[in-house]
Image (cartoon, rainbow, N blue to C red):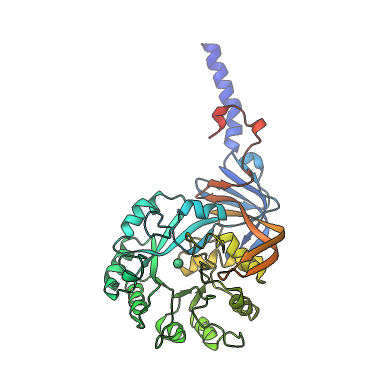
Amino acid sequence: MRALALALLAAAIGQAPVAAQQIYDLLLKGGRVIDPKNRRNERLDIAIAGGRVVKIAAEIPAAQARRVANVSGYYVTPGLIDIHAHVDAQGAPLNLNPDHNTLRYGVTTVVDAGSSGWKNFEQFKSRVIDRSKVRVLALLNIVGAGMYGSKVEDDVGEMDPEAAARMVRKYPGTIVGIKTAHFQPATWDAVDRARKAAELSGSVLMVDFHPKPGRGYRELILEHMRPGDIHTHFYGRLTPQLDAQKKVQPYMLEARKKGILFDVGHGSGSLWFRIAVPAIQQGFLPDTISTDLHKQSVMLPRATMTNVMSKFLAMGMTLEQVIERSTINPAKAIHRPDLGSIEEGGTADVAVLALERGTFAFLDSGHGKLTTDKALRCVLTVRNGEVLYDAEGLSLTDWRQAGPYSNFK
Ligand SMILES: [Zn+2]
């Protein structure tokens, strides 16, 4: 017994220093970190423990981490933020499962843009938001029943600013603002009631807008929207952002100066290269890049986050510009400055992206094709310190060195 006790003690002493050195859960080693908020674009190691980023340095020894992902040759960015998607998977008809359609594209925060309203948000929360690994936030539809077709979405009686604002205030960490969409009657009711709800709740407003006679786009962005409000789908065909000579309309510049934000919201109908290319050539870039991902847009135009980002690279934006509009800009737009960056002490939400070279073709909403020589692909996603997607096995062990079955989890 004494010999056994001594042996155990010796083993404990012998192993203690090794165990003590492994102070990190995960080390992302050797990647090129692009973090626009902190103006970083350099090779850095990132150590993660307890779900937080705990150290960022040029060199952190691999022996100090229980798990090491060699990410040299890849870009390491803050977890991507998609502020326009539809992920009420068990509710509104076109919605997708959030985890399956975000994490493998580097998205760690997704905002459901108005799939539910104040009448059904709590069901959405309990059956989807609370059960997802990806952080799901929401813009609450000003329509109480949410996106359930034109019958309810055109019904002004469904639009109660006080009830919507009460629901936003009840879930301040989850509901980031108000959404109005799809409204067809030629009145300002939907926009103005949504704006009122945003004002009452101190939250942001996102507008999807279909101009009608007497209800024009210029008036929307200059008179009915306020600084910080977001117009989504702004490279779509419904709104007149260019003149007949494809020149950006002066009211677009005026609205931007006033503080109106312009969001992509790709979707099935809202990214047209024939609009976006001339706008970008004239320097009118999006403030935020988002997918409007749903059951249709995920198919032919393939509006996944990394694809939408790749389309903007192909249209001439720099990698830094694209990442800024997919991380810190959307974080600011939804008033969540705690997201969209990689900082010591911050939540460990990180994307690792490959910038691949070759021949790639991307489609727009009109199924027009743009051929390019580079594309972004997500290879690894960390959410709250946990590796949830690892396409190349970068954080994993070769099977021949993996040891007994009990090591596999
Ligand atoms: Zn949408």
Task: Give the image quadrant in which the ligand numbered 1 is located.
Answer: bottom left
Image coordinates for residue 95, horizontal then vertical, percent: 43, 58
Residue shown at 65%/79% (left/top)? 281
In this rendered view, identify the residue nearer to me: 78 or 95.
95
Residue located at (39% from left, 52% from top): 128
Where in the figure is residue 118, as x and y percent of width and height?
A: 30, 64
In the picture provided, is 284 more to the left or to the right than 221? right
Instruction: Please state the horizontal and vertical placement of residue 54, each as a whole percent of the image.
Output: 55, 50
Is residue 39 visible to us here? no
199 to the left or right of 43: left
Most foreground residue, 367 or 217: 367
Q: How many marks?
A: 0
Residue at image coords 56%, 62%: 300
* 354 to 325, vertically: above or below: above
Image-quadrant location for residue 41: bottom right
* Residue 93 visible, this angle: yes
Counting from the top left corner in percent of width and height, residue 333 is at 48, 69
Nearer to us in this view, 236 or 79? 236
- Quadrant in the rendering for residue 179: bottom left
Residue at 60% across, 79% down: 279
